[in-house]
Amino acid sequence: MEQEASTQEVVESAQRAERRPRDMVISMLVLLVPILLAFGVYRVFFNGHDPIRVDQSAAIDDARHSGVFPVLTPVELPAGWTPVSSAWQRVDGGWILRLGFVSPGGDGAQMRATLTRLASDDGLPGATTVRPGHGPASTLDRERASNPYLQGL
């Protein structure tokens, strides 16, 4: 009798261990539906699609007080631009102030305008030292000739 009971338990256990594709789909839905609902609530009710605004004044003040180079505050940005990052840090051979913004459309129009001014020969002199984000210190002439982002502007 005990032998029969243990055999029956083994058969029932094996049947429970078999998973049908339908069971797998239900398990995935049980896991994914709450996550998607939470994400939807975050996006709709808590403005989860908006970039997180950062106060850039501390980095700008640190850069100004160091006196390493003149620091101008970004002004006259189009409506809807959001400051999202700021950093005042030491790099090879100097210091760099990085300020990041996101436009309402998510594009780099302001960066493009800055690059257009740098690419033009009627702007700063070619011998001006610049510190591009992709390497060591350079000159505007060298960047105008070799930087692909300045080509064709």
Image (tube, helix red, strand yellow):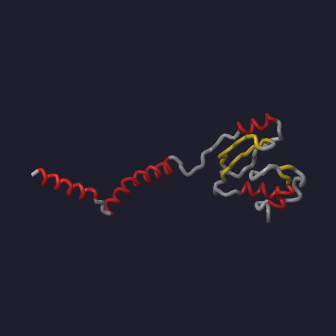
Furthest toward the left, the residue is 1
Residue at 82% over, 55% down: 118
Residue at 75% over, 46% down: 75
Please tell me in which quadrant of the rendered image residue 26 appears.
bottom left
Q: Nearer the viewer, residue 120 or 148?
A: 148
Furthest toward the top, the residue is 65
Q: Can I make out residue 59 in this image?
A: yes
Q: Can I make out residue 153 in this image?
A: no
Q: Nearer the viewer, residue 86 or 22?
A: 22
Q: Is residue 79 left or right of residue 3?
A: right
Residue at 41% over, 54% down: 32
Please tell me in which quadrant of the rendered image residue 72 appears.
top right
Residue at 68% over, 51% down: 79
Q: Position of residue 73 (x, y in %)?
A: 77, 43
Q: Position of residue 24 (x, y in %)?
A: 34, 59
Q: Position of residue 108 (x, y in %)?
A: 70, 56
